[in-house]
Amino acid sequence: MDLGISTDKMVNKRLSINDIAKKLEIAKSTVSAIINGKGDERRISKELQLKVLAYVEEVGFHPHHLAKSLATGRSSSIGLVVEDISDSFFGPIALMIETLAKSYGYRVMYSSTLGDTNTANEIIEIFRRSQLDGYIIAPTKGIEKVVTEMIGEGIPVVLFDRDPVKGVNFVGTNNKSATIEACTHLYERGFRKIGFVTLASTQSQMHDRLSGYQEAMADWGIAPNIVYIPFQESKKEKKKHIERFLENKNELDAVIFATNYLCIAGLEVINNLYNRRGSRLAIVSFDDHEAFALVSPTITAIQQPLEELSKHIIELLIQQIKSPTGKQSHHVELPSVIKQRESSQK
Amino acid sequence: MDLGISTDKMVNKRLSINDIAKKLEIAKSTVSAIINGKGDERRISKELQLKVLAYVEEVGFHPHHLAKSLATGRSSSIGLVVEDISDSFFGPIALMIETLAKSYGYRVMYSSTLGDTNTANEIIEIFRRSQLDGYIIAPTKGIEKVVTEMIGEGIPVVLFDRDPVKGVNFVGTNNKSATIEACTHLYERGFRKIGFVTLASTQSQMHDRLSGYQEAMADWGIAPNIVYIPFQESKKEKKKHIERFLENKNELDAVIFATNYLCIAGLEVINNLYNRRGSRLAIVSFDDHEAFALVSPTITAIQQPLEELSKHIIELLIQQIKSPTGKQSHHVELPSVIKQRESSQK
DNA sequence: CTGAAAGCGCTTACAG
DNA sequence: CTGAAAGCGCTTACAG
């Protein structure tokens, strides 16, 4: 009877399923079932269901997510590991993944590795302790081991952009053939002395772009001209590298940048060179960028299908989460398209 | 004795504090204390502590984050609500917040409202069920109520960029005076017919920029020339709006864009007009953008101190989380600086 | 058709 | 110095 008194209607006491049950004088398991839409399944009377639902609505009760997760082992959250959330490739993908995930009832935690192996491993370690339901990872060098481990434990993982670990779900684009296409695009327009500016990186996507370039050059019997820019360097250093490369290779009439921020860095340098030499250098960049449509000349780019990528990534992950026994090694390769602009016109 | 048999050394059985306790034949509360660094405090012998720690290390045990959260009521996670994670303002801020949060031991969940009230409320609702420790929000119209509610419940919240709700922690920049400065910058260089392109928005930061412009014009006795672009419109529509504005205001010799993507949209249009008219229009944009240093002429921008903003945001939040009783209404206003480039030179 | 009990993996008084 | 017990808020067999 002092029940009424001791029932803690304290200021911010959060409502629990127990409170609901007591108030309505039924068992909390019944409340749980009804809230989770298992009322019919458990053949709970329509009246009771309605009554409970109405009350829940009235008092604005929402189940405690953490408690639910602890009990079910499912957190309805996924982890997104990218290189840099503020990047023009990863940013839009993060936005789409978040939107799509939400439509499936998942929240997303994100973290940026900045290309550092230790950071990446640390992030994944932390995420794993959070019991997330699945992981979307743009892998950096050195996380093969932990990814393999996760796969071994049956944790749903989808890799994207690069795939250092074979036999794991992967979504990416046709880096090699797209680069060959870009070379052909230039070749057809009369450019023969095509340089290639890339990162000093062993990541699979960079490797594929490089080998696409090399293969195209080999096919045409043209000697390749490549510069490898260290990833860690400051933008200023990168620019110097690019400038030196272009100066030394004065005979170049075209250049392909293996990724857009390299092209951005190069653009200022090329402007200088262009002014000085008076001759025009054709340019194609891998990955589009907002600036490319604005600079003069506008820059031709190999556009990756960001939306399609995101869709496949999330669908693959959800599918894996739903049927954890399914095979973990779908390999999706989407086609990029060349967005022609002024920089590749003769 | 069949203990040994029944002890589930099954494939992927996750280790629990209980397993550790049993194995070591001590109470799990002792294990808990030691793991949480409260060994000395509880005066547990150094030997036992070392032994437990060593074993924990050996078997690679990590406490179950969700269980811990449920027990302590703290999740070590914060929620970040922005307008668009892929935006050139929010992206970098998200990166820094994530990095700083991690250094304080917090993970972050993010979500983009895309400026929609319903989406925003939905996101916050979902986040709140996840029992996050604190929230960083770039508020959109219509979430005043829920934010006020949260404050009322003592939930740590930091608003940034705009502050529709007074009396809540806020970190932003001097939008009004920075805009006045930009006007002055143009005025000093001889420009008198200064137009203002802004969003049809009631958000405080946009309002402040507008009133800065209006005040400056009034001071000089110049009639303001303003166009309000609807936020929801497509980029194409926005461009049309801007184009019409500039055509009708042929007498303009300068224009200030109240936010960078408006300037980006305008840049293509202005190029056309510029070519047609042969006269040069001075430009200043609020918020810098990667493209601004690359286009020709390069664009003068009002740079918000993104890093400082992020630091203040996270520090304010952490501080609030640590001492929930402290006042929730710090108002931090940071100064922006004008990055002069070619577009504002006479 | 509905409820009592055990359990998810941790922490926190409390007792000794 | 250390352990047994209760509890965080839920779900899931199980019993009736």
Image (tube, coloured by chain):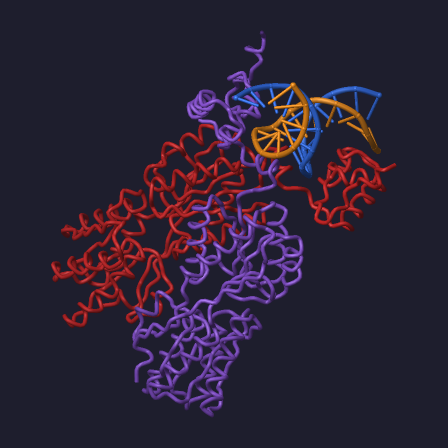
Chain colours: A red, B purple, C orange, D blue
Q: State the image coordinates of residue B178 (x, y, percent, origin top left).
A: 43, 75
**Residue sitting at 85 percent across and 37 percent down?**
A2
Seen in the image, is A183 located left or right of residue A92? left
Quadrant position of the N terminus of chain A in the picture: top right
Q: Nearer the viewer, residue A285 or A90?
A: A90
Q: Which picture quadrant has residue B96? A: bottom left
Where residue A325 appears, as percent x and y from the top left, is 52, 29
Residue in front for this viewpoint, A278 or B208: B208
What residue is drawn where x is 27% and y is 66%?
A343
A258 relative position to B17: left or right = left
Quarter of the view holding residue A81 = top left
Q: In which quarter of the image is the C terminus of chain A?
A: bottom left
Report the number of numbered marks: 0
In this view, B196 is above or below A170: below
Q: Residue furthest bottom?
A: B221
When the figure is inspected, residue B260 is found, relative to residue B326, above or below; the finding is below
- Can you give x and y, in whole percent of width and height, for residue B21 in the image? 54, 20
Q: Is residue A250 positioned above or below B196 on the image? A: above
Residue at x 54%, y 48% (from the top left corner): B322
Q: Residue B242, position in %: x, y?
A: 46, 79
Which residue of the protein is positioned furthest toward the top in this rendering?
B1
Q: In the visual, does A309 lie left or right of A72?
A: left
Position of residue B160 relative to residue B301, above or below, is above
